[in-house]
Image (tube, grey):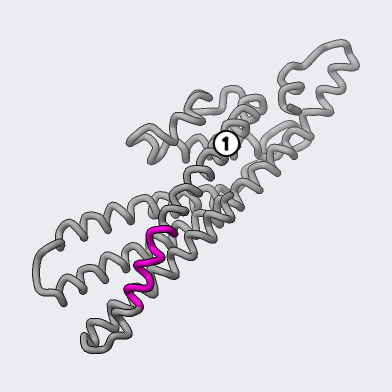
Amino acid sequence: MLVLSGLLSLAVLVGDVLEVRAIGLVLADPEDPAGFDLLESLAARELPVNGLSVILLLVTAAAFVGWFHRIRANAELFVPNGHRHGSGWAIGAWFTPVVSLWFPWQLVVDCWRAGAPVDPDGRRRIVSQWLVSAWWTAWIGALVAPRIVGALVRADSGFGEAGERLEAMRTALQVEVAGNALRVAAAVLAVLLVWRLTEMQIGRAATVIPLADRTGAAGVKDPAASGATS
């Protein structure tokens, strides 16, 4: 789903770049119909593509949050006391206003640390968090860009000559291009994050299972290790 969302965001990005180019053609030569024809063609495709993008985003978000809820549950087994927020925030943090800007990042960082491999003495190793930081930065940038676009459109709507309005529209579209580029980057980084964090937890579970086997052989049941294999 993340790959599909990224590809669709890429298609939207290409459309926005073409629309910026079309406005540039109109501004350069208002008598040339090429720019107007390109704008009309892009406008006809914009509504269905945006509608599909919203649907795919919602489906992808549901799948991602479901995956992360399981990741958070596993992390609780590996490190019971190493989390800044309760397990309920694994879902709620994504939909709560204001705190959704940093709570999810903190949750992912805590899960990332909990999934870090351990040395023979049982001490967790330090794993670079650049992937988590890069993904979250790109995602926040993708969320902020549409707000900037909306503010630009409201500020310039209905004022000035036609050329000035087109210039303002091009500026807003350029910001939208940046936002969609960040959305594509966030999708790519999210794919890497899902893959890497899942692999880390699989590896972490592999270090817990032998301990469970030893305690089981001694007649002691280890519920934490049992839960980690689920």
Indicate whether 133 appears above or below 32: above
- Badge 1 marks a residue whose secondary structure is helix
Question: Residue 182: x and y, percent?
Answer: 44, 59
Residue 83 percent location from the top left of the image: 53, 28
Classify the position of the C terminus by image quarter.
Answer: top right
Toward the right, the furthest residue is 217
The residue depicted at 40 percent of the width and 54 percent of the height is 142
- Identify the amino acid type marked 1: Phe
Classify mark 1: residues with Cα within 10 Å, few (<14), some (14-19) or many (20+).
Answer: many
x, y (%) of residue 86?
A: 50, 23
The residue drawn where x is 56% and y is 41% is 64
Q: State which region is magenta.
A: 38-49
The majority secondary structure of the magenta stretch comes to helix
The residue most toward the left is 160
Q: Magenta span has 51? A: no
Q: How many marks?
A: 1
Depth check: give the residue in front, 123 or 69: 69
The residue tagged 1 is: 68
| Residue that protrudes farthest toward the top in the picture | 219
Q: From what the image shows, is residue 215 above or below residue 126?
A: above
Name which residue lies at 61% across and 23% down.
Answer: 80
Indicate left or right for 210 with 155 as reference: right
Picture residue at 46% right of the left edge, 53% below the top: 53
Residue 221 higher or lower than 25, as above or below: above
Residue 48 colored in magenta in the image: yes
Q: Position of residue 60 (x, y in %)?
A: 53, 45
Is 22 in front, or is 209?
A: 22
